[in-house]
Image (cartoon, rainbow, N blue to C red):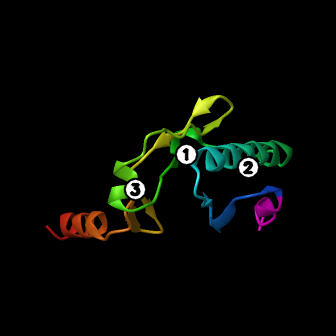
Amino acid sequence: MYINDLPNCLESCIARLYAGDTSLTISGAQFHDIEGLMNTDLRHVLTWLTVNKLSLNILKSEFMIIGSRQKIASLECTIDLSVNRISLSRVEHTKCLSVHIDENLTWAEHVTNLTKQVK
């Protein structure tokens, strides 16, 4: 309940809150626009955390670009997302609520991790 008002500080992103985890999502056609809007909202989140006497675990903070294989392969630019001048790492897959999600929204990473658990 303590973080339920965090989404109110966002201008462009959608926040998904679950227990101690928060995911921010944004969509758009131009990477430059997405980068600017996301960095703005990251600054808003940092301000909100400071005001509420909370901190961000930057080591657990990362971002993922989701799209088709062709779109991601044809990217000509990089996105620089940062918090307090510390760049966030871009990942190709992540785990969210025990589901492994990859940048192409395939089930490959999830199935691979499930089969590792069975062996």
Identity, as a three-letter code, of the amino acid under mark 2: Asp
Q: Which residues are magenta?
A: 1-8
Q: Residue furthest right?
A: 51
Looking at the rendered structure, the secondary structure element under dot 1 is loop
Give the number of the disc on residue 61.
Answer: 1
Tell me: 78 left or right of 21. left
Question: At x 58% / y 57%, what residue is drawn?
Answer: 29
Looking at the rendered structure, the secondary structure element under dot 3 is helix
Task: Give the total number of marks visible in the rendering.
Answer: 3
Q: Is residue 4 magenta?
A: yes
Identity, as a three-letter code, of the amino acid under mark 3: Lys
Q: In the rendered image, which residue does mark 3 sit on?
A: 71
Q: In the rendered image, which residue does mark 2 sit on?
A: 41
- CA gap, disc 2 to disc 3? 25 Å
Where residue 94 sits: x, y (%)?
42, 57
- Residue placed most toward the observer, 27 or 89: 27
- Residue placed most toward the observer, 11 or 1: 11
Question: At x 76% / y 62%, what residue is drawn?
Answer: 7
Identity, as a three-letter code, of the amino acid under mark 1: Ser
Question: At x 60% / y 30%, what residue is drawn?
Answer: 86
Which label's residue is closer to the chain start, 3 or 1?
1
Q: Residue furthest left?
A: 119
